[in-house]
Image (cartoon, rainbow, N blue to C red):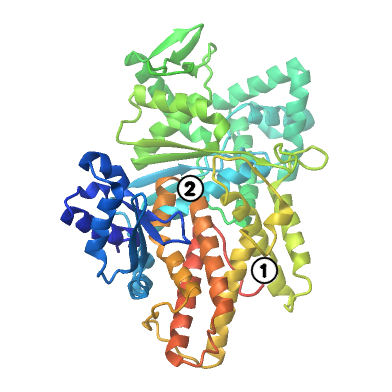
Amino acid sequence: MQKIIEILQEEISVAFEKAGYDKKYAKVTVSNRPDLCQYQCNGALAAAKEYHKAPIQMANEVVELLENSDTFLEITAQMPGFINMTVSPAFLSDYINKMSGEENFGCEKTKTEETIVIDYGGANVAKPLHVGHLRSAVIGESIKRISKYLGYHVIGDVHLGDWGLQIGLIITELKHRKPELVYFDENYEGEYPEEAPFTMADLEEIYPYASGYSKEHEDYKKEAQTATAELQAGRKGYLALWQHIIHVSVADLKKIYDKLNVSFDLWKKESDAQPYIPKMVQDMKDGGYAHIDDGALVVDVKEETDTKEIPPCMILKSNGATLYNTTDLATIVERRKLFDPQKIIYVVDKRQSLYFEQVFRCARKTKIIGSDVDLIFVGFGTMNGKDGKPFKTRDGGVLRLETLLADVTKQVEEKMAERDMDETARKDAAQKVGLAAIKYGDLSNQASKDYVFDIDRFTSFEGNTGPYILYTIVRIKSLMNKVAEQGIVVDENTPVLPAANKSQTDVMLALSKWSETVEAAFAEQAPHKICQFVYELSDAFNKFYHENKIVTNEDDTVRASHIQLSRLVGRVLETGIDLLGLEAPDKM
């Protein structure tokens, strides 16, 4: 289904050509002065130089050709050469009725069989999820949902960190605490226990302790490095412990990600890329891409056009050890082999932009991936406290995500304490509203920008917040319940009538932006555009709700139209919040 702007542009293009001007100038945009008009075309201003005419003269010629069009309620030329357009109520309602009956509300699915891998999450095993993991998870989840909605084959990968020194530190500390465990007996030939000799709570205590201790005791650090090397060389007991660490960690991570309404198609790990490294490194050497620099194997990735220094991409350290670069490049090799993607999107802290620039350049230079595959870096800003610094607990520690969820849910429950709801419904609503407060508070900001996490503002039921959006959806659900209780039957094919006032027009105009919003959100990896859409639609609907009789309207035809319009708004809003990874309760 064509977007409303495309329809207008076609009509304006025909008029430009009839007036003797190139249709390339007939670009239509949403008006930046909604008090004057709904849409505008500034093409006459751009074309004036080519045609040696006053822009206002050209604009008037175009407008004259469209004055009798049924599309417009009003079309005028304004100095110095703007073309201002307001569509007719009949045209707008006809568009909304077509949208209502179309799959995806007229938002066209891709015609290409394109596979997209999205790398988000990035948690490390043996560590709890904290607020620093929030943005990658919720932004990546939304990009995944938007992409799937448009018909792409999307694979979301958590890409766990599981193969570095952190594992060696845990193994070393376990050996100090429980040397009697069979995992440390190199002569043990039996089966290792199925049950892990530790819990997630144990790991959460062991790793920080071991990490801190290693920084002050060089011999301990060397022991951990040796344990890491032995693990990576295939020592059986250490591999069994590593598997336990992964199993216990993933079970805990899934529990928290589920609470965030975030899921992954793949639970791949850094270690999964290890088998691809030897051949990849050899290919780099054989192809003449890699060379030795100060003992390390590196690939130069600087280009003549660079205005800043881009360091070489290190592939192997001087001692032969691999790095994150090595693993990330090998992961691209693995993804190419397993999935043949056309896009790989990395949702990562923007402070890693230089690192990913090196990795992407290296992947292309060494022919790991061709120019037919887009490597996309979606760098996000930091979540800050009210002091403008990265969000911390009151004692300066890093706040666990589970704790943040619990704190926000509790605050929402307190706000809803006086509402006439049974306990089960209140708890369900508080969880969904609390999650919306956190995720919408994050997603409504442009990903690349830092933002302040303001729990009081984010949990507000007014303004551009998650709770306000959910409240609007619940209001529509309540409205539909009244319709059912009163035995009012409105067929799904009932038409929405042309708007009779501004509030009706504004709801329809807000709805009409659905397709272009979703497509722009996908093209720019920008979930905040979906947030802006659902907020504008919610705001328009609430004004419509207050200014028009809906269920109580005396005119049956008008009542049916208003109910149908409200129903469509509810359907679109619920789809919109689903793309954000949110869900509305039945009551609030």
- Is 250 situated above or below 586? above
- Identity of the residue drawn at 47% across and 69% down: 506
Residue 521 at x, y = what percent?
44, 51
Identified by mark 2, the residue type is: Ala
Q: Where is the N terminus found, in terms of image quarters?
A: bottom left
Q: Answer yes or no: do the residues labelled 2 and 1 have beta carbons within 8 Å?
A: no
- Identity of the residue drawn at 79% across and 37% down: 396
- Is 94 situated above or below 118? below
Residue 474 at x, y = what percent?
60, 73
Q: Is residue 234 visible?
A: yes
Determine which residue is flagged by label 1: 428
Residue 6 at x, y = what percent?
30, 58
Q: Which quadrant of the figure has residue 89? A: bottom left
- Identity of the residue drawn at 27% across and 43% down: 48
Q: Image check: 163 left or right of 428?
A: left
Distance CA(mark 2)–CA(mark 1): 29 Å
Determine which residue is flagged by label 2: 526
Q: Image check: 95 left or right of 196?
A: left
Taking depth in this image into account, of 269 and 494 the one nearest to the observer is 494
Q: Image check: 341 left or right of 12?
A: right
Taking depth in this image into account, of 232 and 315 the one nearest to the observer is 315
Secondary structure of the residue carrying tag 1 is helix
